[in-house]
Image: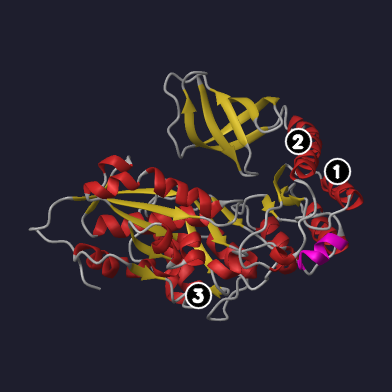
Amino acid sequence: MPSVVSNETRARTFYIETFGCQMNAHDSEKVIGTLQHQGYTRIETEEDADLILYNTCSIRDKAEQKVFNRLNDYKKLYKQGKRFGVLGCVAQQEGEKIFERAPYVSLVAGSASYRKLPEMLAQLERGEQRITGLDDRQTEETFETEFTARSNPHRGYITIIEGCDKFCAYCVVPFTRGKERSRASTSVLAEARRMADAGYTEIQLLGQNVNSYRDLEGKKTFAELLAAVGEIPGIRRVRFTTSHPRDFTQDIVHAIDSVPTLCDHVHLPVQSGSSRVLHMMQREYTRDWYLERIGWIKSAKRPISMTTDVIVGFPGETPADFEETVDLLGEVQYDGVFAFKYSPRPNTPAITMADSIPDMEKSARLQVLLDRQREIQRGNYSKHIGEKIEVMVEGHNTARGQVIGRTSQNKTLNFTTKQPILPATGNYLKVRVTNSFPNSLVGEAV
């Protein structure tokens, strides 16, 4: 690929803002790494940057409008010679319509095209006004971005599968990320070893449906790949997200039991506790199917923390359906729930359904669900009091004199230490839990 770096070229700067999930955050790391390699310097404010990029997410309600509002807020900078780019899912979803709604945007690129950024940057440098990268979501080359500027020196992400073949009625991901494409296990393990050699101790494997992974080389199942990453010298923690119940297999639980470095946490989105609603959502499993997998997790040799996603107010959800979801929370005893009100998304099957549940009712149901989950978490977290738990240091709360740590179960544990110097980020320490809240633990370093 041609380089746009030249000794005669003035210093170029860029600002990037990332919306949405961990996969978007990791995509931004790829974009940042590529831009820096091409001679650009990252700037912290739009006003000071030559190139302004928004890496977008289309999952949440009014995601497109939020992007256009942000663009509108800063369009005055276009007159100062700034260039704008829209990346990610909204870029893939809206395509060249972005140029029509925001004529001052020069670059629209989906996630599969980031390896072509050097070419697109060269086009920008030549003064081209409408540059797109939207046409190759089906290629496995999407994984092979040469430069990645990882934002955390201790924890790093590896995308092992892109896209989704599930076509749930409410979800836009198959239309923005394309079909499922898995990465060869040899490539995944080679990147994991490079990260370990560079000092990373925690790796998180990513995918829209990470456990739908199918090795291009046919060498390893998802569970075997998890285990192999966990056995790399220097790696102390391995996480994965997000799983789909349809592809969650019992050997994943066996791997967590067998390999101590695999974190004892599973995020398994249920979306609804009603089989009738799950059928309307086109999730292709039932409540009983889901609970069977929860049973596998609960039967593990070591306690595994469970979290989930829930949508309330899906078209046709009755009060009885909603009560089944609330009941499921009590049956499973999740340690965390990400709950959202249903909102129609472009191109999805559900957009043709009558969204007959008033927003006020959706809000009321959401609050009931969150209140119930808060009670569950209060009880779950309090069970840790008195335990000694290993944490990785993530930061410091100097105002409270606390160190911020994270457990293998992905729980925040804020603690104090009697040592005169606070432990640095990335360190691993044993902490005795002395108190608990619904969303965090408190303790003292042992």
Which residue carries the number 3 mark? 184
Disc number for residue 17:
none
Residue 41: x and y in percent read 24, 49
Instruction: Identify which residue, 235 or 351, lies in the foreground.
Output: 351
> Residue 96 placed where, x, y %?
42, 68
What residue is rendered at 57% in x and 75% in y? Answer: 179
C-beta proximity under 8 Å, tags 2 and 3? no
Looking at the picture, which amino acid does disc 3 mark? Ala
Give the magenta part as a residue range: 276-283
Image-based side of 171 in relation to 144, left or right: right
As helix, strand or loop, the secondary structure at mark 1 comes to helix
Sequence-earlier tag: 1 or 2: 1
Q: Please tell me whether residue 139 is drawn above or below residue 322 in the rendered image.
A: below
Position of 16 compared to 18: left or right?
left
Which residue in the rendered view is the most extreme toward the left?
8
Q: Secondary structure at mark 3?
A: loop
Dot 3 surroundings within 10 Å: few (below 14), some, or many (20 or more)?
many
Please state which of residues 365 and 94 is positioned toward the viewer in this rendering. Answer: 94
Q: CA distance from mark 2 to mark 3?
A: 38 Å
Disc 3 to disc 1: CB gap under 8 Å: no
What percent of the width, then of the height, locates residue 436?
Answer: 70, 27
Q: Main secondary structure of the magenta part?
A: helix
Residue at 29% from the left image edge and 40% from the top image edge: 47
In this rendering, does residue 233 appear at all? Answer: no
Q: Residues within 10 Å of mark 2 (few under 14, many from 20)?
A: many
Picture quadrant where residue 111 is located: bottom left
At x 52% / y 67%, what residue is drawn?
160
Per the rendering, the mark at residue 377 is: 2
